[in-house]
Image (cartoon, helix red, strand yellow):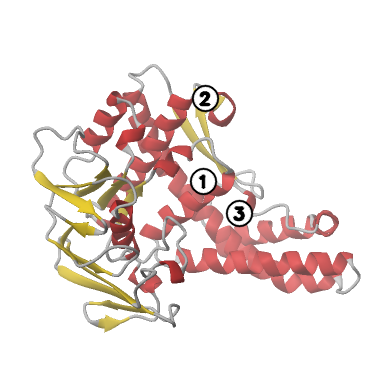
């Protein structure tokens, strides 16, 4: 899969961008705050995922402008397709997204068509960051290969908020304990579904990431990734989330109701689970060095790309947003060697990146414009 044409205008500071990217390597070079990351973000939005920079709707349009437009042509093994993404003030929430000229209900409906994986400096915190960071990583990764998953995960989050409000009201005597049942039944079914898909994905991730880590460490260290569930003691070999797993999930919620009421929030569930990394049997969060954390994060992101390629039959587009500058030369070369054969968009402040011998294009960005 690769982008054949990209047009962006009015997205943040980007102005009249029109490029025909190389199917292999595309380097976007320029000083800070010139628009390099904005361009990567514009590409990412066309995958149907929310901004990796958590940009709010009103922040997507240039402060001095009224409209923004993105047009992305991409080609996979089957055909070439076109994504258009338009917004206008003052109704920034009314996004006009089309796939091959057909208007979609929301940008999320683009999901599963144009696939890409983004690496940002923040991703280097994936190993040592909070469990929430890893849950978000898992949810996005699973969603890319199971389109219906994202909707279930979003609905689960909404139900958890409602259940937590109810728990507080019960503690205040404003609601009754038996009102929890209707929420718990829904949460149990969705939570079991999410648990099973996350666990199965984590198994694939571990297989690939551990092999990559063995290579990056020269065989000196062994990495293991484990999905930790706050509800289930065992998920291996289990498949029936509608009955067996959801019943166990529901029992867990029911057994913890009193504790949840005291705490004022739901203490067990997929919203409290984690993906834990171990290096030579020791917890990475507790014992890994900065270099080890970065290696774990890199192999997790590379494994994400490999799984996406395996499941869809098409290699995703790789977006490297100022990541290589954060790595030492050996890790730079490792990343570059592992994305050979994929289309790559890379941002940097200078063009001294380790892509010797690989054909591609160099673009220079200044004040939101391509100047060469």
Q: Secondary structure at mark 3?
A: helix
* Position in image of residue 287 (x %, y %): 56, 23
At horizontal 44% and vertical 43% (from top left) the residue drawn is 122
Name the residue that disc number 1 marks: 134
Of the residues tagged 3 and 2, which is closer to the observer? 2
Vertical order, 26 against 293 (above or below): below
Which quadrant would residue 328 be assigned to in this image?
Answer: top left
Determine whether, in the image, residue 237 is placed left or right of residue 162: left
Name the residue that disc number 3 marks: 270
* Residue at mark 3 to residue at mark 2: CA–CA distance: 25 Å
Q: Residues within 10 Å of mark 1 (few under 14, many from 20)?
A: many
* Residue at mark 1 to residue at mark 2: CA–CA distance: 16 Å
At horizontal 56% and vertical 47% (from top left) the residue drawn is 235
At horizontal 61% and vertical 57% (from top left) the residue drawn is 245
Name the residue that disc number 2 marks: 288
* Position in image of residue 363 (x %, y %): 16, 50
Decide which of 148, 154 is in the foreground and name it.
Answer: 154
Q: Earlier in the sequence, mark 1 or mark 3?
A: 1
Decide which of 38, 46 is in the foreground and name it.
Answer: 38
Q: Earlier in the sequence, mark 3 or mark 2?
A: 3
């Amino acid at each position: 899969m690769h982008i054949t044409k990209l047009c962006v205008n009015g997205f943040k500071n980007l102005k009249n961008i029109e490029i025909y990217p190389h199917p292999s390597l595309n380097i976007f070079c320029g000083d800070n705050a010139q628009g390099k990351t904005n361009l990567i973000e514009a590409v990412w939005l066309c995958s149907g995922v929310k901004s990796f920079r958590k940009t709010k709707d009103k922040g997507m349009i240039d402060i001095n402008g009224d409209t923004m437009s993105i047009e992305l042509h991409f080609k996979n093994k089957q055909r070439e397709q076109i994504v258009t993404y338009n917004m206008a003030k003052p109704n920034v929430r009314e996004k006009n997204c089309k796939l091959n000229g057909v208007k979609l209900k929301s940008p999320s409906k683009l999901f599963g068509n144009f696939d890409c994986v983004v690496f940002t400096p923040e991703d280097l915190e994936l190993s040592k960051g909070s469990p929430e960071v890893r849950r978000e990583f898992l949810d996005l990764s699973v969603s890319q290969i199971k389109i219906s998953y994202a909707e279930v995960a979003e609905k689960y989050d909404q139900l958890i908020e409602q259940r937590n409000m109810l728990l507080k009201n019960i503690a205040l005597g404003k609601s009754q304990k038996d009102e929890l049942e209707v929420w718990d039944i829904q949460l149990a079914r969705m939570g079991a579904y999410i648990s099973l898909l996350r666990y199965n994905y984590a198994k694939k991730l571990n297989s690939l990431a551990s092999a990559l880590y063995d290579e990056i460490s020269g065989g000196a260290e062994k990495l293991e990734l484990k999905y930790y569930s706050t509800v289930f003691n065992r998920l291996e070999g289990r498949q029936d989330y509608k009955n067996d797993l959801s019943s166990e999930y529901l029992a867990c919620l029911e057994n913890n109701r009193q504790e949840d009421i005291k705490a004022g929030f739901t203490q067990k569930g997929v919203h409290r689970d984690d993906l834990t990394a171990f290096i030579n049997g020791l917890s990475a969060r507790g014992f890994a060095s900065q270099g080890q954390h970065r290696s774990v994060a890199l192999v997790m992101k590379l494994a994400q790309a490999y799984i996406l390629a395996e499941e869809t039959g098409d290699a995703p587009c790789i977006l490297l947003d100022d990541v290589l500058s954060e790595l030492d030369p050996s890790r730079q070369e490792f990343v570059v060697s592992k994305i050979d054969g994929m289309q790559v968009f890379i941002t940097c402040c200078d063009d001294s990146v380790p892509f010797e011998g690989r054909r591609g294009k160099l673009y220079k960005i200044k004040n939101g414009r391509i100047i060469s």
